[in-house]
Amino acid sequence: MSIFRKAFSVACVVLMFQFFAQLYLVAAAVLAIFQADDNAKDVFSAFKSADTFAGLHRANGDLIALTILVMIGCSFGARYPWRKPS
């Protein structure tokens, strides 16, 4: 098995964990807002706390895009014939 196939497998596992992290982060952001009491101070505090989770959610989304690009590169690398035909 080539190094690109192993790297592709590792990237798949990383992508799976990133996907579950995305779900966790968006749920944490939304639930922080939904659990706020109905007054201006609590709602403002909830949005400030949700903003942290939303920023992490966005950064993780950018990492997911990079992981997918790495997986595309590994898939092409795994299919490329590295030996010269004789």
Image (tube, helix red, strand yellow):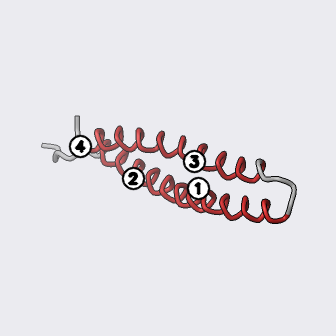
Q: Residues within 10 Å of mark 4 (few under 14, many from 20)?
A: few
Q: CA distance from mark 1 to mark 4?
A: 31 Å
User: Which callout, 1 or 2, points to the residue nearer the camera?
Assistant: 1
Front one among 48 and 53: 48
Q: Residues within 10 Å of mark 1 (few under 14, many from 20)?
A: many
Are the two marked residues, 2 and 3, in contact with CB atoms closer than 8 angstroms?
Answer: no
**Closer to the N terminus: mark 2 or mark 3?**
3
Q: Disc 4 marks which amino acid? A: Ile
Are the two marked residues, 3 and 1, in contact with CB atoms closer than 8 angstroms?
Answer: yes
User: Which callout, 2 or 3, points to the residue nearer the camera?
Assistant: 3
Image location of residue 46, percent across then percent down? 72, 58
Q: Residue at x 54, y 41 (%)?
A: 20
Q: Quadrant of the N terminus?
A: top left
Q: Residue at x 23, y 39 (%)?
A: 2
Front one among 70 and 31: 31
Q: Which residue is mark 3?
A: 22
Q: Which residue is mark 1?
A: 57
Helix, strand or loop under label 2: helix
Front one among 56 and 34: 34
